[in-house]
Image (tube, rainbow, N blue to C red):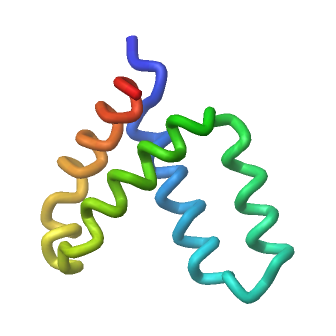
Amino acid sequence: MLKYKSSDVQKMVDIFAKISENKDNQTKVMDELKKLVDYPENVILEFLHCIEILNDKDETYLKENYWGIIGYITMRLNFS
């Protein structure tokens, strides 16, 4: 059984998207950061590493391969 599921990855994607959108609002950023306390540091770092790898991909690629990307990140989180 997997410790981390695709719903965890989607949750992290949403959290970091909201942090990015609200970077000028410390209260909203802190509210979002609090949602990450359920995850150990190594899992968050692995998630961020995966996102860095995808930085050079365009929006079309990300949309077309969304579930594959979510699956890949989920596997990486479970092996970290």
x, y percent for residue 77: 40, 33
Residue reaching furthest bottom?
A: 24
Instruction: Residue 75: name its quadrant.
Output: top left
Quarter in which the N terminus is drawn: top left
x, y percent for residue 69: 23, 51
Horizontal relation, residue 54 to residue 22: left or right: left
Question: What's the residue at 80%, 65% (across, down)?
Answer: 30
The number of numbered badges drawn on the structure is 0
Residue toward you, 52 or 15:
52
Against 59, residue 10 (above or below) is above
Against 58, residue 62 (above or below) is above
Instruction: Residue 38: name its quadrant.
Output: top right
Horizontal relation, residue 58 to residue 77: left or right: left
Question: What's the residue at 63%, 72% (across, down)?
Answer: 19
Question: What's the residue at 35%, 24% (across, down)?
Answer: 79
Quarter in which the C terminus is drawn: top left
Instruction: Residue 15: name its quadrant.
Output: bottom right
Question: What's the residue at 53%, 45% (across, down)?
Answer: 44
Horizontal relation, residue 77 to residue 27: left or right: left
Residue reaching furthest top?
A: 1
